Image (spheres, rainbow, N blue to C red):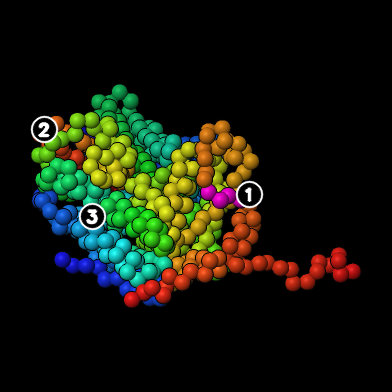
């Protein structure tokens, strides 16, 4: 079965969704990301969706659930690059992406993830990044 | 109102849901719907196709290009022979779900369409029709 | 004598008389309606119409929709189009053709003598023909008016959704006029697309020019704000006038967004949030003295 590739850059996992996902693929991504956060001790997840032409309730739920799981594992999720038409449709659909930070593009998204990390580092000097394999 | 073209697509697997989305997108582009309207009807189609698959045990969708005066529209009819819906009003309520979904499928699809019609016979199946006009 | 032939003979032979009598009626009507058409222009138009009416009748036809009357229909269409653009009333425009009846009937009377059976035939034929021509004139008039209205509507929609860039990454959308759902759709799309194009972090929606904010408008605003948020941009609503704030509270409309009284306040917030500060370069004049 196809998988969506996950890149790791610093302490951040980056996913670019480029295909029209069927539901199984979305579920697989959620599993893979969760496993990868635990394995690498990543502190941030950046999901880039500028190629996505629609986000329906299933994909929306996947995003919300990735964010919630990540939070439990002490990582922050940012969704970047949502298209205007997709955003309007999601609002009309009644779906709120609670607990998810959003950014206009990958660059901003990366900055947002890192800002979150450094804020926390100032507080309690986390060194989870060292557990990576 | 005249139907200028009709095609039927099966909804048996998850891949069929993706195919329905792509076909609906192509038809929406063909009748000249704007980008936002395209996205709305494709999203609604995705929700309803998944309902057909998950709750209706599979079925099919009939896509029609319809014309009323100078206006073109896209009408989609989702049919399944599943268990049906006993309480439609309840099923239309946001966040109500009998399965594991978010419960936004029916209500959401209605909000994303210009026309919405649902008929269901418990034990016989469900038919949902939506339309989006240019 | 055949209706068309009699009519043609009268209109051609008595063209000058008909035109002058018609002009007199038109001039009288004009003063009553504020004299919109200039007299010289009217004289030229009347001359052309009467002579083309004669030409049409010469084709031996009484059918106003026939090919013989094509040039006359064209002339009348031009006249009514220009009248529509100049803002003439429908009555003025219809009367232009209707008032031709009286001079034509009188000319028929002069030619046949009263009591002649030909007179009745002629009057009926002329009445039918002129009625049809007047209807044609009105159709063109209305079509032109609708064209004007359609164009204006489009212009208003385009004019009323200007997204302006206030600063790097800060956009403003000054809304003017009533927001209905069709317009809000356009506004929403324009703003969100501008956010993408300008890579804006903050968009200010200024509603100083929106006369009323009811539940529906508030809902539209909230949806726009929510959609922008999903894309990674923040919105600030500014310019909620006191009466509107009161109405909103009475209606129970909640606007759960950052809102500021004026566009200037909102801009200051936006600058602060993007890490900028406005400072005065030098002390004001009073203090320097």
Residue occupying the point 48% across, 55% down: C161
Mark nearest the camera among 2 and 3 is 2
Report the residue that reaches farthest toward the right: C289
Give the camera-side residue of A50 and B55: B55
**Percent x, y of residue B15:** 15, 58
Which element type, helix, strand or loop, lies under badge 3?
A: helix
Q: Report the span colored magenta.
A: C257-261
Quadrant in which residue C241 is drawn: top right
Left or right: where does residue A109 sit relative to residue A4? right
Distance from label 1 to label 3 (Cα)? 42 Å
Residue occupying the point 23% across, 61% down: A28
Q: Chain of mark 1?
A: C
Residue occupying the point 37% across, 43% down: C142
Residue occupying the point 43% across, 70% down: A128
Which element type, helix, strand or loop, lies under badge 1?
A: loop
Distance from label 1 to label 2 (Cα)? 58 Å
Work out which quarter of the rendered image holds the N terminus of chain C and state it: top left
**Percent x, y of residue A27:** 24, 58
Give the camera-side residue of C249 and B8: C249
Work out which quarter of the rendered image holds the C terminus of chain C and state it: bottom right
């Amino acid at each position: 079965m196809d998988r969506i590739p996950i890149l790791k850059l610093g302490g951040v996992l980056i996913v670019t969704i480029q295909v029209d996902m069927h539901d199984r693929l979305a579920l697989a991504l959620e599993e893979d990301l969760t496993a990868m956060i635990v394995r690498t001790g990543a502190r941030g997840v950046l999901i880039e969706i500028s190629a996505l032409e629609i986000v329906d309730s299933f994909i929306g739920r996947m995003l919300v659930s990735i964010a919630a799981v990540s939070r439990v594992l002490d990582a922050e999720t940012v969704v970047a690059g949502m298209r205007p038409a997709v955003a309007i449709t999601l609002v009309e659909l009644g779906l709120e992406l609670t607990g998810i930070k959003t950014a206009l593009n990958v660059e901003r998204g990366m900055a947002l993830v890192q800002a979150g990390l450094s804020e926390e580092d100032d507080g309690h000097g986390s060194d989870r990044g060292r557990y990576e394999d | 109102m005249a139907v200028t073209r009709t095609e039927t697509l099966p909804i048996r697997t998850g891949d069929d849901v993706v195919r329905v989305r792509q076909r609906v997108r192509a038809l929406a582009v063909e009748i000249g719907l704007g980008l936002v309207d395209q996205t709305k009807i494709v999203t609604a189609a995705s929700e309803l196709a998944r309902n057909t698959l998950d709750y209706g045990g599979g079925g099919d969708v009939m896509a029609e290009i319809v014309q009323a005066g100078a206006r073109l529209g896209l009408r989609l009819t989702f049919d399944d022979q599943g268990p049906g819906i006993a309480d439609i009003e309840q099923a239309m309520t946001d966040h109500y779900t009998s399965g594991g979904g978010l419960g936004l499928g029916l209500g959401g699809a209605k909000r994303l369409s210009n026309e919405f019609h649902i008929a269901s016979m418990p034990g016989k199946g469900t038919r949902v029709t939506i339309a989006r006009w240019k | 004598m055949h209706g068309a032939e009699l009519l043609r003979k009268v209109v051609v032979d008595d063209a000058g008389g008909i035109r002058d009598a018609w002009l007199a009626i038109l001039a009288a009507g004009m003063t009553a309606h504020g004299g919109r058409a200039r007299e010289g222009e009217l004289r030229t138009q009347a001359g052309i119409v009467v002579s083309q009416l004669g030409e049409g009748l010469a084709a031996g036809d009484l059918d106003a929709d026939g090919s013989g009357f094509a040039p006359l229909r064209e002339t009348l269409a031009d006249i009514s189009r220009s009248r529509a653009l100049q803002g003439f009333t429908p009555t003025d425009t219809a009367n232009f053709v209707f008032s031709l009846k009286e001079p034509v009937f009188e000319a028929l009377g002069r030619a046949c003598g009263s009591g002649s059976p030909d007179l009745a035939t002629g009057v009926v034929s002329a009445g039918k023909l002129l009625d049809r021509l007047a209807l044609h004139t009105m159709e063109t008039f209305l079509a032109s008016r609708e064209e004007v209205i359609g164009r204006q509507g489009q212009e208003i929609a385009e004019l009323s959704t200007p997204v302006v860039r206030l600063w790097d990454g800060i956009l403003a959308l000054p809304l003017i006029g009533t927001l209905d759902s069709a317009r809000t759709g356009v506004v929403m799309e324009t703003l969100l697309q501008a956010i993408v194009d300008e890579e804006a972090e903050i968009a200010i929606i200024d509603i100083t020019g929106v006369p009323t904010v009811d539940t529906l408008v508030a809902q539209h605003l909230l949806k726009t704000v929510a959609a922008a948020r999903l894309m990674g941009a923040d919105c600030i609503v500014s310019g909620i006038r006191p009466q509107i704030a009161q109405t909103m509270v009475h209606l129970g409309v909640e606007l759960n967004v950052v809102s500021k009284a004026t566009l200037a306040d909102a801009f200051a917030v936006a600058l602060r949030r993007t890490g900028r500060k406005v400072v005065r370069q030098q002390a004001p004049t009073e203090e320097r003295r």
